[in-house]
Amino acid sequence: MAGAVDAAPVPLPVAGDGRRRRGLRARLRSCAVPRRRERRSTGVRISLEGRTAVVTGGASNIGRAIATHLAQADATVVIVDRDREQAERTAALCGERTSVMTTDLSDLDQLDAAIAELKDEFEAVDILVNNVGWVNTLPYLDKDVEELMLEVRLNLVGPMLLTKGLVPGMAAQGWGRVVSVASEAGRAGQRGQVAYAAAKGGVLGMTRALSHEVGRHGVTVNAVSPAMTVPRSEDEIGSGSMQQSRKRPPDLMAKIIKSYPVGRVGTPEDIAAAVTFLCSEQAAFITGQTLPVNGGFVTT
Ligand SMILES: NC(=O)c1ccc[n+]([C@@H]2O[C@H](COP(=O)([O-])OP(=O)(O)OC[C@H]3O[C@@H](n4cnc5c(N)ncnc54)[C@H](O)[C@@H]3O)[C@@H](O)[C@H]2O)c1
């Protein structure tokens, strides 16, 4: 019976006379179109079974979508976030292989302790998603140094130290994925986001440079760069800072949406799909890259 399935003809569009159909069949065969069965075996379902993934800021919004997507791909997920309540809600959505580590990632001592605990707990963390982010949209010149440093600590220093802490384990086992969630503000710049953009731009530099050091050890390092991303429901919003930038009057929001070529702003699921792909086996030949997930808002 297997042979019969193999021999099944490729379905053809309805049109034309018999002569034309035969011609098309012949042409399809000569283009080496895979038979049905072979096509099925090249499916793109992403499996992260047996992989352990750490998602920072994974309690709500984009981080929640990333955590649930990775869990759906059968990864064991560790949510590192300071918001325990939201993190527990996300863990419940992800399933039983998910755990929560309550950590304030802006505090370098807590960050160090989290890295030590992760190394202790898991033989190797296979996937690190540097998703946590923080923005304060006051004009640059109105911010004090502590506010500027907070943005740099959460958006750049934290991802750098976590990456430095966890990549050696990935390299030692010959497989790993680092995916950082940057921002189009870091590529294109944006009013009120000077320190944030500087830090996100720094993450892109880290991504490019580190890929050269660890590629031969089976570790890829990439970034996704979202533009405005809004969850479908208020329930997805936790205690993060990015919601400030979502509180816009409807007429301004309508203008913003109009400026997106696809006619809408992003959703957390848009970002999570891109992150999950970059974590996959299928993305093994992609490293040092930034994937804009922006609905065409920035096209360079
Ligand atoms: N939402 C957007 O429009 C947008 C656009 C571009 C880039 N991004 C980036 O995407 C990522 C996720 O954004 P988001 O909109 O989901 O953010 P968010 O502010 O809604 O959520 C951030 C998460 O990080 C956690 N968090 C905040 N401070 C923390 C700390 N000190 N320690 C530990 N956890 C902390 C929060 O509890 C929350 O779960 C960020 O890196 C952000 O810069 C977002």
Image (spheres, rainbow, N blue to C red):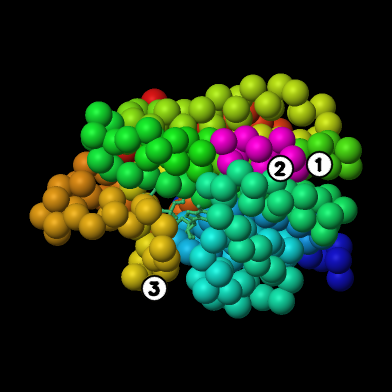
Q: In this view, does 168 lie above or below 34?
A: above
Residue 177's tag is: 2
Dot placed on the residue nearer the N-terminal end, 3 or 2 = 2
Q: Which of marks 3 and 2 is in front?
A: 3
Task: Examine the image and state in which quarter residue 102 appears.
Answer: bottom right
Side of 230 relative to 272 (left or right): left
Helix or strand or loop: what does disc 2 sit on?
strand
The quadrant of the rendering that contains the N terminus is bottom right
| Residue name at image x 51 percent, y 28 percent | 202
Q: Nearer the viewer, mark 2 or mark 1?
A: 1
Is the CB–ligand 1 distance for label 3 below 8 Å?
Answer: no
Relative image position of residue 45 (x, y in whole percent): 68, 58
Q: Mark 3 points at which residue?
A: 235
Relative image position of residue 109 (x, y in whole percent): 64, 47
Foreground residue, 74 or 138?
138
Side of 282 relative to 160 (left or right): right
Q: Are marks 2 and 1 in contact (CB under 8 Å)?
A: yes
Dot placed on the residue nearer the N-terminal end, 2 or 1 = 1
Q: Mark 1 points at which residue?
A: 170
Residue span colored magenta: 157-166
Q: How crowded is mark 3: few (under 14 residues within 10 Å), some or many (20 or more)?
A: few
Helix or strand or loop: what does disc 1 sit on?
helix
The quadrant of the rendering that contains the C terminus is top left
Dot placed on the residue nearer the N-terminal end, 1 or 3 = 1
Foreground residue, 251 or 245?
245
Foreground residue, 265 or 124?
124
